Image (cartoon, helix red, strand yellow):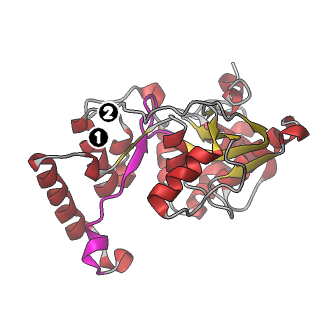
Amino acid sequence: AAWCKPYCLECSPPFLVGWYNEKRKETADGQQIIEAREDAVAFALWSIPGYLAVVADHFRRKRPTSNFVDEATDELLDLLRTDLGADLDAVVINTDRGPPYYHVQSVGCVAGVDEHIEAYDFTGTEAEAWREELSDSLEESRDTKMWGTDPATLRKIFGVNVHPVWGGWYAYRALVVLRGASSPALVKPPPLKCLEEKEAQRIIGEYNLRHAECLWRDLSADGHPADRRYTTSEYFFFTETSPAKRKRWLELRAAEMEQGVRAPGLASLASLAQ
């Protein structure tokens, strides 16, 4: 945790590879399993608000031409690999890049980091009506050029993970598997529950219907603490899908940094390390 803090990262409690692999067998026919002993210890890393300062600092120094966030993450993971002892036989993976690819929602669930919510979690007549209404809205709003014409696909409601502190204002960045460390006596945590049914349904609805607006990231419809959200700069940067516009933003920010200008709503690495 101390290593993570200056880089706006957080680390999960330890979990066992076997817990994750079992979850993947239950939910995905064993796809994306971790190739390691079942009692090997693993950790997940995720970024929190402030991480864009890390990305901007990396861009200023290294000037990558693409994959700006992943390049910054990879630099940190290289540092982490160096710090981990050889006897741990560590595998450190950027979960946004592959192969191999891993299912971070399953990781967060078995590690007890966040709550995974699905539309079918809710029972009763009212819940059935809510699901039907949401599926109707999705079928009407989804572009068939992107989604195709299969009604089941157009009506599909996707689940999401929600953190008890950050809500949805965080992103998984890495998986660390210590193949040289085992802990068969480690106790698996129960599934995390941090949401009331009404808020969980709201989050699922917003996540599926208006994902880019990020209202689903707030833990409450009444609002969310500003210091537990992305900054205004992060909101626009991380929801921007154009690599060219992301690059231009980073070029502008790098020029400000070289002149000692602090961007509104964006912390400096020095202040983050305090």
Q: Position of residue 54 (x, y in %)?
A: 68, 39
* Closer-to-camera residue (164/147): 164
Place residue 44 in its image quadrant.
Answer: top right
Q: What residue do we see at 57% from left, 30% from top?
A: 187
Q: Position of residue 245 (x, y in %)?
A: 56, 59
Task: Tell me if label 1 and label 2 are in contact, CB under 8 Å.
Answer: yes
User: What residue type is disc 2 on?
Assistant: Leu
Q: Please name the residue that numbered disc 1 is placed on.
A: 200
Q: Please name the residue that numbered disc 2 is placed on.
A: 195
Q: CA distance from mark 1 to mark 2?
A: 6 Å
Considering every residue shown, the one lying at the far top of the view is 274
Give the numbered dot on residue 147: none
Considering every residue shown, the one lying at the far right of the view is 86
- Give the overall secondary structure of the magenta segment: loop
Q: What residue do we see at 70% from left, 47% from top?
A: 73
User: What residue type is disc 1 on?
Assistant: Ala
Q: How busy is the neighbourhood of tag 2: few (under 14 within 10 Å), some, or many (20 plus)?
A: some
When the figure is inspected, residue 71 is found, relative to residue 265, above or below; the finding is below
Residue 3 shows in the view = yes
Place residue 58 in its image quadrant.
Answer: top right
Magenta region: 149-170
Q: Provide the secondary structure element on which disc 2 rests.
A: loop
* Closer-to-camera residue (247/195): 195
